Image (tube, rainbow, N blue to C red):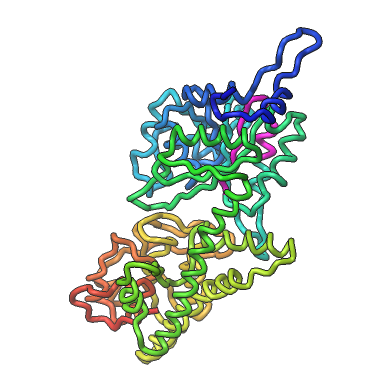
Amino acid sequence: MCSRYRCYTLTDRISDLNLFSVSNETNQMSPNHADELMDRLQSKTAHVAIVGLGYVGLPLARAMHEAGYRVMGFDVDAQKVEILGRGENYMKHLGDDFTQPLAESDRFNATSDKKRLSEADVILLCVPTPLGRHHEPDLSFVLESTKMAADALRAGQLVILESTTYPGTTRNDMLPILEETGLVSGKDFFLAYSPEREDPGRKDANTATIPKLVGGIDDVSTDLAVELYTGAIAHVHRVNSAEIAEASKLLENIYRAVNIAMVNELKMVLNDMDIDVWEVIEGASTKPFGFQPFYPGPGLGGHCIPIDPFYLTWKAKEIGRPTRFIELAGEINSQMPAYVLSRIVTALNDHGLALKGARVLVMGVAYKPDVDDLRESPAAEIIELLCGGGAQVSYHDPHIPQFPPMRKYQINLKSVPLTEEYVAEQDCVVIVTDHQLVDYELLGRCATLIVDTRNAMTGKPGVKATVVKA
């Protein structure tokens, strides 16, 4: 026989007889929860709940809604729920109108009531996975949201984790919590992993167009998760287990971290040799095969690349296997803010100035261009190092009017207006993030000294300032 969601072998058919236990009292077969949920997914009558309405959860809610599902957005931050209810958007990089279709639809609602998760057929967990003080994985948000899902769990639900984590989290950490309810995985409820691949600010791709990896803790869970995402995402790639999906996500970001570390190290070497690393990369990029360009910078930012590799290194230590290559890359990348400071100090010295008392304007503090995202931004450490050296620091960022409270840094600054007079008063301008909205011609015309960590000044007309690449 062939089911709606997969073809069975004879062994499968015998195994699946367990799904149809006969009641002694009613002599009726118990429902097949997998088939029932598959029907709702295929007919788009399934109710999808998304836990965590941040950089991952909010775009996913929009994609699921556009696909035709009924969507419930859950967040512990009641202010986010209120903002969404007004049709407004707290994620500026998504655009002012991004949430309007959600607010106007009868297929979307936002809530801070965790009890309502029981209404959903599918619960998607999109919560942070940061590092602890000693670079150890912090799964507290994953575990708390899993407990929340367990409190609301009922037969026939599918739970999917989207947060980046180490291999084994879905099966070894989440599954026991859900099974404490007495419900049986693969029969009463279903569990899978599908890593987020958001890149805030990217214009050529979005949640619905970026291919999706899906791996469950069993075949039925994978079937159901694939069907869910197939209804909303252009391409879905099935893998054989949750662990493969978890490890694939880590590989994506470790690949970037290692290659960025390589060009960051190359930058330091070539700078000492008076060779422009940016021109070197441009030259190498002319090879049509066997080379992919990566670019240096002032340090890694965002949630993924500075954090995710450490999830694998921690897990590797648990099984006694060192990850020297990954750890070395992390070491090099984490040195970049200090290297930028050393280039600033040298550039000021060459102009007869000390760092102490110097007026330094930092251009851009977001972790990447054209977004309002400060997560793990190297700008915070660079500012702290400058202040620690006695510099008079200010910053300009068209996307971040004021530094928000941060876990590791206490920076009480507001973005200053970018005027010719203000730039001319500065001893040094440091370009940390190259936003498109910045007037680089004004900088080149009015500044005396520019330390450029992003190659932003190359090719700009009328540059009178001394430009030092860092």
Residue 399 is situated, as x and y percent measured from the top left of the image, at: 37, 56
Q: Quadrant of the C terminus?
A: bottom left
Q: Percent x, y for residue 127?
A: 58, 46
Residue 36 falls within the magenta-colored stretch = no
Q: Residue furthest front?
A: 10
Please count the marks in the image.
0
Q: Nearer the viewer, residue 311 or 127?
A: 311
Whether 329 is drawn above or below 188: the answer is below
Residue 234 to residue 425: above or below = above
Q: Residue furthest left?
A: 462
- x then y, percent, for residue 157: 62, 28
Vertical order, 294 against 187 (above or below): below
Q: Do we see residue 138 in this rendering?
A: yes
Residue 153 can be seen, yes or no: no
- Farthest residue toward the right? 24
Q: Please indicate whether residue 234 sits to the left or right of residue 193 in the image.
A: left
Q: In the image, which residues are magenta?
A: 146-163
x 45%, y 32%: residue: 231
When asked about the image quadrant of residue 395, the answer is bottom left
Q: Is 323 left or right of 356, judged from the image as shown?
A: right
Q: Quadrant of residue 314?
A: bottom right
Q: Classify the position of the N terminus by image quarter.
A: top right
Identify the residue at horizontal 62%, vertical 45% (top origin).
Answer: 242
Q: x%, y% of residue 205?
A: 36, 48
Q: Residue at x 65, y 34 (%)?
A: 149
Q: Is residue 410 left or right of residue 464?
A: right
